[in-house]
Amino acid sequence: MKKLLFLLSFIFLWQASGECLPQSPREGYIRTSDGVRLFYKIVGSGAETLVAVHGGPGNSLTSIEPDLEPLAKNRTVIYYDQRGNGRSDLIKDREKLSISKHIEDLEAVRTHFKLDKMMLLGNSWGGLLISYYAVAHPDKINRMILHSPAEPTQALMFEAIDEIQSRLDQRYDRTQRDRFRVVSNPQTWMKADNPRAICREFFQMIFPVYVSKPESLKLLKGDVCSGSEEAVRNQQFVNQQIWRTLGSWNLLPSLNVVEAPVLVIHGAADPIPVESSEAWARAMPNARLLIINGAGHIPQIEQPEIFFRAVETFLTGSFPTDAKRVQPSTEKS
C-alpha cells in the first residue's frame, strides 16, 4: 500500500497593476535561502503573469508545460522545476524536501520575479502545494486555480488509491498486474540501469486509468520522464520524502484564511473522488468547482476547449458560468 501511495501520487501568477514582468532570461536559476538552485522557464510575454506549478511529487515542468501552451497566448507564464526534480538541484537530504521548504521555494519564485501578488495554477500535487503556500501567505494570492488537485486530506487520498487499484484490477490480467507491481516499486526505479525505461513503462500502464478514454492519451505532449537519468531516478526519492513529511495531513481546517478567488477544476472521470474537489471548494470562502464531463485527471487534453475557456474566463476576472459554489455538508461528523 505504501509503495502504491508513493507512486500513484505522481499522477497525481502576480498581476502587478498592469505592469510588465521585469526583463528576465527566458530560462535560468533561482537560488533559495538554503542554497538550492531552482530551474525556471518563462513562456509568453503578456502583461499578466501566471505561475504554473507541476505535479508529482517528483515530476518536472515538462510534464505540464507543453499541454498548457495556450495559457501563454495572452500572458507570461512562469514554470519551475521543484527542488530535487528536473533541472533543479537533485537533493538527497531528506530534511530539504519538506513541505515547508517547498512553500519557501514558491515564495522565492515570487520575490525573484518581484511579484506583488501571484496568480497561481497548481496541477495535481501542485494544487496541494499552492494551497499550502496560500495558507502560509494568503496576502500574496491574487487568484488561484486548483487543476485536478491532489486530495486535501490523507483519508481522501486513500479513497483515491482504492479506486485506482480497482481500475487497474479491471483493466489488467494477473500477469500484467504482477508486472505493474514491479515497475511501481520505488526500488525498481532507484536500482534500474535504465530508470527512464521503467518510468515510461509505469506511466504507460497507469495513465489509462486516469483518463475518460485511453485513446485520448495520444494527444498528450507532456513528458513525465524527462531530464537526466539521475533526475528520473530521483523522482522516487523525492516522492517518498514529501509524502512522509506531510504525514496524516488535513489542510481543510486551515483554508478559510484563503480569501482570494479560487477555481477548482475536476474531470468527472478522474479516479480522485469528486468529494475531494468538493471539499477543496467548500473549505475556501471564495471558491467554486467546475466539473468537466468527458475528462479524467488531464482535462486539458481530453476537453481542451472547455478547460482553456474556463481558465481564460477565470484569469480575466470572472468565474466560468458552469462553476458552482459547493454548499456546506449537512452530514454529521
Image: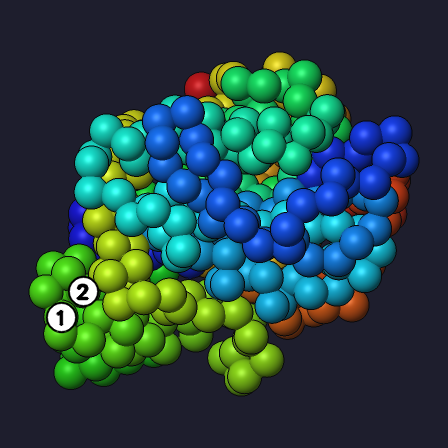
Horizontally, is 74 left or right of 8 in the view? right
The amino acid marked with disc number 2 is: Trp
Q: Is residue 85 above or below residue 218?
A: above
For the point 70% across and 39% down, which residue is it? 13
Secondary element at tag 2: helix
**Residue placed most toward the observer, 169 or 330:** 169
Label 1 close to label 2 by CB (< 8 Å) = yes
Q: Residues within 10 Å of mark 2 (few under 14, many from 20)?
A: many
Horizontally, is 237 left or right of 102 in the view? left
Horizontally, is 257 left or right of 154 in the view? right
For the point 15% across and 83% down, which residue is it? 175
Here the colouring is: rainbow
The amino acid marked with disc number 1 is: Ala
Q: Which residue is mark 2?
A: 189
Q: Residues within 10 Å of mark 1 (few under 14, many from 20)?
A: few
Q: Which residue is mark 1?
A: 192
**Residue placed most toward the observer, 19 or 156:** 19
